[in-house]
Amino acid sequence: MDDKIQPVTEHLGELRRRLIWIIVVFVFGLVVGFVFAADFVHWLKQQMPSNVTMHVFSPSEPLRVYMMFAFVISAAITLPFALYQVWAFVKPGLTKAEQRITLTYIPFAAIMFCLGLLFGFYVIFPYLLRFMTGLSDALGTTETFGIYRYFGFMFNIVFPLALFFELPLVVMLLTRLRILRPEPLRKGRRMAYLGMVVLAAVITPPDLVSNILVSIPLILLYEISLLLCTWLHRRIQKEDEARERAWLEES
């Protein structure tokens, strides 16, 4: 009985240690993000339209802005480290080939997250902002934004997109490990579309244009994931067939 319990306690202890390290790195990232938050804010303000001004409407807003930026910076720092810790934890249960395959996906996960941030900031967010300010101009009003609400609006769009950019990578990894096949993605396409439209409605202002503008890249990412899954699954099947033929020839 003790022989069976001991490995479980060892795994739980290892899991606890790795979670602690992830928390430590996240806290370190918060400190780094807090230190450099002002630099990011000044840089982002330079990217704003010249007719937009920002104000502080409460004493706590600057601190909340600092913490918002610190969280996003910390998430970007912690993501690859957390993925490596997950890989190291499950490594003993993987074959040598699976260990090598899964490890190569970790740096790409960080790259895709950064690409998602850039896509959201340089493509989606400017269109939404121009649309909103255009409505304001049509009403003959002057845009005055609270700094916390402005950046909160930006991160509500950019951060979920960055996370969703991980979808093709996750799908490819699960396909490579033979956990996922293309059929479930095809069968669940309608429900996935509905879920993405709902997600877009949650993270965007309550208007149809914003919803459509965010839904389109989410749906495209899903379709790209399906195409990659199909391609990789066929490649794996060909590899299996080649190995089977080689085994038959040898026998």
Image (spheres, helix red, strand yellow):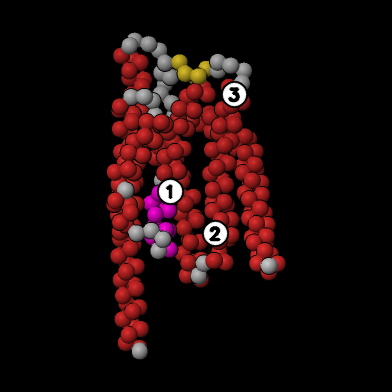
Label 2 Cα crowd, 10 Å radius (few <14 / some 14-19 / many 20+): some
| Residue 76 left/right relative to 218 | right
Position of residue 211 relative to residue 217, above or below, is above
Quick check: is 55 in the magenta stretch? Answer: no
Position of residue 223 relative to residue 12, above or below, is above
Real-space Cα separation, disc 3 to disc 1, in angstroms: 31 Å
Residue that appears at 33% across and 79% down: 244
* Residue at the disc numbered 1: 166
Between 6 and 249, the one lying in front of the other is 6
Badge 1 or badge 2: first in the primary sequence: 2
Looking at the picture, how far across and down is residue 14, in whole percent?
Answer: 65, 58
The answer, for residue 21, to whether it is visible in the render is no
* Residue at the disc numbered 3: 62
Q: Secondary structure at mark 2?
A: helix
Real-space Cα separation, disc 1 to disc 2, in angstroms: 16 Å
* Amino acid identity at mark 1: Glu
* Amino acid identity at mark 2: Trp
The answer, for residue 78, to whether it is visible in the render is yes
Position of residue 38 relative to residue 191, above or below, is above
Q: Secondary structure at mark 1?
A: loop
Q: Which residues are magenta?
A: 167-177
Looking at the picture, how far across and down is residue 134, in whole percent?
Answer: 33, 19
Q: Nearer the viewer, mark 3 or mark 1?
A: 1
| Residue 157 left/right relative to 229 | right
Label 1 Cα crowd, 10 Å radius (few <14 / some 14-19 / many 20+): many
Looking at the picture, how far across and down is residue 237, in whole percent?
Answer: 32, 69
Badge 3 or badge 1: first in the primary sequence: 3
- Residue 87 is labelled as 2
Real-space Cα separation, disc 3 to disc 2, in angstroms: 38 Å
